[in-house]
Amino acid sequence: MKHTVVALVEDRPGVLNRVASLFRRRGFNIDSLAVGTTEEVGISRMTIVVDGAEGIADQVEKQLDKLIDVIRVEDMTNAEAVVRELALIKVRCATTQRHEVRDLIEIFRAHIVDVSPDHLMVEIAAEQDRMDAFLVNLRPYGILELVRTGRVAMLRGTGTTAVHEDEPEAIERFHMESGRLPEGKLPYVSD
Amino acid sequence: MKMSGADIVLECLKKVGIDTVFGYPGGVVLPLYDRFPAHPEVRHILVRHEQGGGHAADGYARASGRLGCALATSGPGATNLVTAITTAMMDSVPTLFVTGNVSRNLLGKDGFQEADITGITTPIVKHNYLVMRAQDLAYTFAEAAFIAQSGRPGPVHIDIPKDVFQEEAEFEWPTEVKVRGYAANPRIDPDMIARAADIIDAAERPLIIAGHGVILSNASDELRAFAEKTGTPVLNTLLGLGSIRGDHALAYGMLGMHGSYEANHAASNADVIIGIGNRMDDRALGRFADFNPTAKIVHIDIDAAEHGKNITTHAPVLGDAKRVLQVLTPAVKQNTHVEWVRWIDDLRAEHAYSMQIPSGPEISVQYVVNRISQINDEDLVIVTGVGQHQMWAAQHMKFTHPHQLITSGGLGTMGFEVPAAMGAQVACPDATVWSICGDGGFQMTFQELATMVDEHLPVKMAIMNNGYLGMVRQWQELFYKDNYVSVAMSQPDFMKIAEAYGILGIRVTEKEAVDDAIRAANSHNGPVLLDFQVEAEGNVWPMVPAGASLRETVEAPREQQGVNR
Ligand SMILES: Cc1ncc(C[n+]2csc(CCOP(=O)(O)OP(=O)(O)O)c2C)c(N)n1
Ligand SMILES: [Mg+2]
């Protein structure tokens, strides 16, 4: 089964390596990994699609959360979320075929972003099913090149997976809920 | 105040309470070494190998509960720490490893003695840092010390390029560290407590497995109170030994691959198992799929990732063992389990022979470690290597207090025994420290004898000289049809080694001489090397073959019971 896991991480050198190292070491299978900045300076968001049984997803979440640079982890697999992936596709297309290909593109809500006499470059942002169906339909024309970004996901409604440093109350609540009590007065001595 | 990065590092060490650094110099850390004399509050102990320094920091931390610290230069110095770091990681030991690296402009250029040491340590540390500005040093050390000692403790590594030691910066010690991605002290969830309490109250045959976490969180008193209130027998993992007095009426010793017959069968027949600060490790539990499949599992651990990692957990309780037990004990009913306890007692009586000390004329390891334990006071600190002698020490020595047994459990690192004992002696200068050494393991790291001489560390090192990599030989005998391959070792003359290092050496060849040798070592104010010439082919029993279940605990064949072979 495929699990979609979102991790908010400190935007620091080495953090991608920590996550990759963890997945390699624990034998978790990554289908895709998308990393980018967020609305909050200093926080990056990783969307990871992992393949494995139910127990695996639980371990992925907990092991990720254990990394110091990982701030928050959310399993989006069964959440009410918008899930998208972006692809750029260079497809063979003679001028005579333009019409039918454009029909396809319209049906699948894709866009043409580059044109030459015998090919088109198409951009599509879609959820898994639409993406797969689109590729199946394009394939007969001859796909010359394909690039996909990997899945990203965001909760529908007002709920968020974000962490906002400029909302002290929200962050305090988050710390309390997750046991991240901002303690650690120095010098730290274990009792 | 403005000062060099080197001075900042030394100020930081003082601030986080590190009074001793086990280190080894080299090119890139010279700016730091240059400043040690200006900071006499930080004692630098020159070890003879960085691995020794790392294990010494580990032994220091395990013996005292304080943060241990080791220091090494870049490249080979840093890579020599790797085994020690992994050892500390597997056993959750609060340690700080500091390495130098090449100057910032040379990083990534494969220059002389550059190793990507933070890349190397990433999977074997709790956290690590490459500090690129002197102004970041103070906060980094504060955060590192906090992370190493809080939550589930572990090793933290700080890598510092040479020119960061030389760069000047303002030294500002932070008043607080905030790590937003780190739950040092998880809030105890009342629902989890309630669920655990329900299961515990309904139990007829409950059993506690107490691990290292009880010791790390100083929860011995709470463990005893909980066990007594609920009338629950307590087993220990190897690293949990000492978390409850071995002679407590509810204490039943170690379970696992070389656990007692009664402990392994109690674990297999309990209806509720309460793990406290243990990892549910394969050496303790046997084959996971067959580990008491009908028991309800309550698992108290501060690391959420341990819940359900190896076996299904019915009631995970997230939190520090001490704090959880403080809440859980009042929440459970007072209880006794007379019949269940009697069942285990009967099993213990019926199977006492399976862990008997051999009575024959030859010296056995069981006999020696037991005598060391009997002759010394209760506050004896025991360090071991890895192998048969380690298991016999766990079986036949008395454990009365936490931090008493210092042994590499998770990684099983041979060569740990000598440097870790050295570190323990530094941490506890007035304690009697005995290191139970394998003749194999001793030869991996005994260069630290020189350090002990320099630093006047009166460690008693008892080599269990069986002429074999004994544990491997035992497996070859039992599972590879006596096909001994690369397990017999020719030995150096250990007395000459003692002589070469200028320490007292005692060779023991007769059983009658064992007690006198132990007493002579105790009364000698300096390091002592004892060469106990023990029976060559004794086997550790009982044994759960690797990959078998605890129910399949094998006892010694009749002809081997309680006699030397
Ligand atoms: C560094 C390291 N290398 C190899 C092993 C595998 N190993 C486990 S026990 C053992 C034999 C230990 O021999 P010795 O130190 O003489 O102790 P004995 O078992 O004889 O008491 C070996 C080789 C190990 N645990 N650690
Ligand atoms: Mg040996």
Image: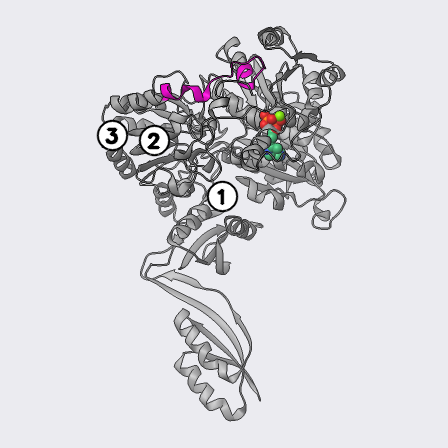
The relative height of residue A83 versus residue B496 in the rendered view (above or below) is: below
- The residue at which mark 2 appears reads as B324
Looking at the rendered structure, the kind of residue marked 2 is Val
The numbered dot on residue A68 is 1
Measured in 3D between alpha carbons, the distance from the residue under mark 2 to the one under mark 3, in whole angstroms, is 22 Å
Q: Is residue B535 above or below residue B148?
A: above
User: Quadrant of the image for the C terminus of chain A?
Assistant: top left
What is the x, y in percent for residue A62?
Answer: 42, 46
From what the image shows, is residue B406 above or below residue B269? above
Report the Cα–Cα distance between label 3 and label 1.
Answer: 41 Å
Q: How many marks?
A: 3
Q: What range is drawn magenta here?
A: B348-369
**Residue A131 lies in the magenta stretch:** no
The image's mark for residue B204 is 3
Where disc 2 sits, the SS reads helix
Sort mark 3 into few (<14), some (14-19) or many (20+) by Cα contacts within 10 Å.
some
* Camera-nearest label, 1 or 2: 2
* Amino acid found under the numbered disc labelled 3: Glu
